[in-house]
Amino acid sequence: MIESDELAAWLRLLETPGVGRESARKLLAAFGSPHAVFEARVTGRREVVSANAALALDTAPKMLKTLVATTLDWLNAQFEDAPRQIITLGDSSYPAALLETADPPLLLYAQGRYELLRTQGIAIVGSRNPTPQGMDNARSFAAALSGDGLTVVSGLALGIDGAAHDGALKGSGSTIAVVGTGLDRVYPKRHHELAHRIARQGLMLSEYSLGTMPLNQNFPLRNRIIAGLTRGTLVVEAAMQSGSLITARLASEAGRDVFAIPGSIHSPQARGCHWLIKQGAKLVDSAQDILEELKPGLRTTENAGLCRNDSVPAAEGDPLLDALGYEPVTLDALVARTGFSATDLNTRLLELELDGQVARLAGQLFQRVGLG
């Protein structure tokens, strides 16, 4: 476990106002350690960073003692099924994949299975407001990829992220949640139980100090860690103005693979994926497509071939399901396609909805979904 004085030096370096990640990285490269940074003269620091940053480091932040004490308490409150650790840049346990990126975090807070940081990972990201089929795809792809030993990395957000974590926990590869808050907080609150499951069975990870609230600017920044930890990024659903496209761009810039699942040309949630495919992302409709790229020559599991969008036909031969297809459709369109009355269709659609085979969307649209 990190010693108190070493922790204090790291937190002072990272929490001093006016000293950002880039300046802190330059100082560490020049002086070797946080202690050495503070032992250096201001004139020496000025040769590395701006005069304001060099001078600011002479005064410890007012909240430093409290933050150090809070962090030590958090570390000392260890749980056997969810151990806690602080990993600094240069530690032997620091994930090698992050070292290959342009902006590796200088310090990481971790809770859970640290060994997952040394495994081969795949990021799965997407919309916070996905379609039911998107949720099903995220969960089933994650389960299949995790079942083949990959670690699924995502951001614990609502929608695709949560479904990916949930699916990954069903496989041997498990999951890492990279969050935009301190690890003493769960955001969104709706994922409180999921976060605790991940801490016990996977790994919770953050670069933000304890007590950090869910600030908007933190979430795009954490995306670089999601992309950096993994060999590739799968975008399940994404609108054109989506944080998932940021993750995909960061993955591409780091030389990692980018995958995208296509969707309906009429769905706003598919436009981001279609744009990525036009930019060179690999179109995938099964987990095996990804495994072939990340694990060449590997004989994949039986589950890997079961993750196609149309892989789980429900009630084979049902004319209404055939008429639905997999794109959102209106009741009027179904009347025209099937010749059934609106009353009969409403009755049958309700039965299929209760059976989990059809989802009712906003705007009086219906969509066929795979069984989870």
Image (tube, grey):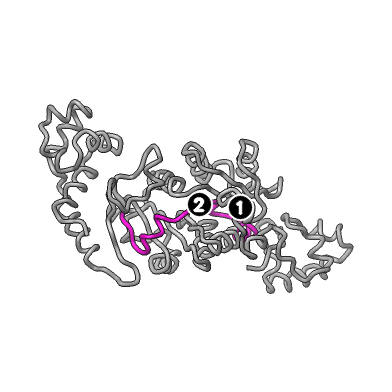
Which residue is identified by label 2?
123
For this rendering, which residue is in front, 368 or 47?
47
The answer to whether 231 appears left or right of 57 in the picture is right
Q: Residue at x 56, y 52 (%)?
A: 295
Q: Quadrant of the C terminus?
A: bottom right
Q: Quadrant of the N terminus?
A: bottom left
60, above or below 334, in the image: above
Which label was assigned to residue 297?
1
Span highlighted in magenta in the image? 109-137
For this rendering, which residue is in front, 126 or 358?
126
Number of marks? 2
Residue type indicated by callout 2: Ala
Position of residue 274 measured from the top left corner of the image (x, y, whole percent): 65, 42
Q: Residue at x 51, y 56 (%)?
A: 161
Position of residue 340 measured from the top left corner of the image (x, y, whole percent): 87, 66
Residue type indicated by callout 1: Gly
For this rendering, which residue is in front, 70 or 171?
171
Task: Let me know if residue 163 appears in the view.
Answer: no
190, above or below 27, in the image: below
The answer to whether 142 appears left or right of 8 in the picture is right
Position of residue 80 measured from the top left corner of the image (x, y, whole percent): 31, 72
The single residue placed furthest to the right in the displayed view is 339
